[in-house]
Image (cartoon, grey):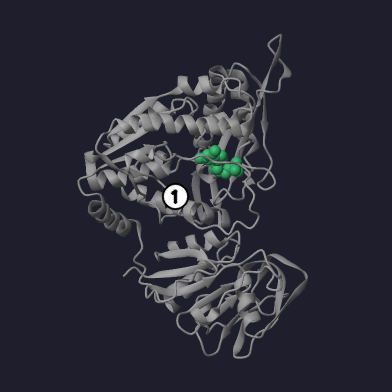
Amino acid sequence: MQQKIIILDFGSQTTQLIGRRVRELDTFCEILPYNKFPVGDESVIGVILSGSPFSVHDPEAFKVDLSQFVGRIPVLGICYGAQFISYANGGKVEKADSREYGRANLCTFDGDNPLFKGFVANSQVWMSHGDTITAIPEGYKCIASTANVKFAAYASETQPVWAVQFHPEVFHTTQGTQLLRNFVVDICHSRQDWSAASFVDTTVAELKAQVGDDRVILGLSGGVDSSVAAVLLNRAIGKNLTCIFVDHGMLRKNEFRDVMHDYECLGLNVIGVDASKKFFADLAGVSDPEQKRKIIGRDFIEVFNAEAKKIKDAKWLAQGTIYPDRIESLNITGKVIKSHHNVGGLPKEMHLSLCEPLKWLFKDEVRRVGRQLGMPEHLITRHPFPGPGLAVRILGDITPEKVRILQDADDIYIRGLRDYKVKLSGEEARRVLAAGVPANMKDGEIEVSLYDQIWQAGTILLSTVRSVGVMGDERTYEHPVALRAVTSTDAMTADWAHLPYDFMAKVSNEIINKVRGVNRVCYDISSKPPSTIEWE
Ligand code: XMP
């Protein structure tokens, strides 16, 4: 039986990060809404309660019946989780005098407690809470404090319950992984048998059993998820897999040709469909971002379905859906900002069953599985790219000429990011390594490209704007492009990347000199929120 840790989600921004950190310990985990603990599931070896945007005193705060698991399996409460355990057992949680936010150090901790095995004096932790615990329940003891937070961590004296008010899952908590390892491996006794190699073996066997001799269709996007799903299925069922890759004309420069070549080298049975004329015709004169998305989504399904129907005896539709796409979000705001389109469904009359081989994996695990399958590094580390492609990176209406200008500018930028090497150390190096970038640590440093250091980069054509410039002796009156690069772990929040000035100078020069139609280059220094990653 596959052991698992359950992470109960109380709505924190970092819940998924807890999941990823547990998986990095080669341990399977599931993130479930706070009120969906799987009572009676024998494979659960421990529970983690996440943080939350709420105070335990808010009338709408999420509450859980702790007796479902306390005393049965080990429990770790993080931030709100820690405050809730205290509050529910008769401790006291009150508004902190000032919001406790940012770095702090554990000035005292109980070195004999298994949660702190291997901890060094003054270990740095990350705090982020408005409430604080002012009294812990009877039968519990304080096991760590910072200068400002007396109950930074506490534990039950009689039951396997631990609670920390800081966030071990974030990188600023320097021994956070050690703490989670102490909980998951030493306290919950994880066998640590969840790895890319074991995933490939079991999934290939499961796919063979699930699909048998049936034919399967899969929509490829050029992105890492659908590509890894295809290679995995190809290993399981070979030529019974037919992949369809639709070119809507708004991919990056030469991307369709290059990616088709990669897929053929990987031995995939892939049909490439150049449908760019149809997309350009249907998008002509459309400027509204949501309209563009709708047209592209609709056309995509139409083109994909027309191809899929030609594969007469297909029984399955495979998709590269990954775990974060499926985690039941608590959606606290309930508002839609952008309607993202993904590969759409097929007509009901085709009666296809859904096959989602990556549905339990986080993005970094997908990358590890890709490497395990021997896929080329440039396919694996490719940045996320929106389904509607450059259409949402051209402000205003779309024409083939505007796409050509943007492709040329973007190509210079992306090649520049790949070529420019940087040395990283400390938190930055750990963050990049944990995202699955292959690099060797030497003397506390790693060398990676700027491309690998950031989550996502792209160029935006401000085609609704013109500005004056001068080239040679000629006046120019052309469009600016904006360069965007962000660091992120999940695209939910993102910081603009602090790219080196000499890099920006070189790229700006090259774009203005080489790309006809562009006479100005700007760099986008907005973070998400309040901005989004894409401009449209
Ligand atoms: P935003 O712009 O919402 O983007 O901050 C978050 C992430 O989603 C990607 N994105 C899309 N992906 N279809 C997609 O498949 C879309 O319509 C779409 N819009 C944004 C974006 O590139 C980023 O990774």
The residue carrying pointer 1 sits among few (fewer than 14), some (14 to 19) or many (20 or more) residues within 10 Å by Cα, namely few
Q: How many marks?
A: 1
Pick whichever, 127 or 207, lies toward us.
Answer: 207
Above/below status of 229 relative to 155:
above
Quadrant containing the C terminus is top right
Residue furthest to the left in view is 213
- Quarter of the view holding residue 472: top right
Q: Is residue 40 above or below residue 293?
A: below
Q: Is residue 85 above or below residue 388?
A: below
Residue 230 in the image: state x and y as whole percent: 33, 42
Q: Which residue is mark 1?
A: 439
Residue 79 appears in the rendering? no
The answer to whether the beta carbon of the residue marked 1 is less than 8 Å from any atom of ligand 1 is no
Ligand 1 position by quadrant: top right
| SS at mark 1 in the image | loop
**Is 523 situated left or right of 244 in this image?**
right
- Residue type beneath disc 1: Ala
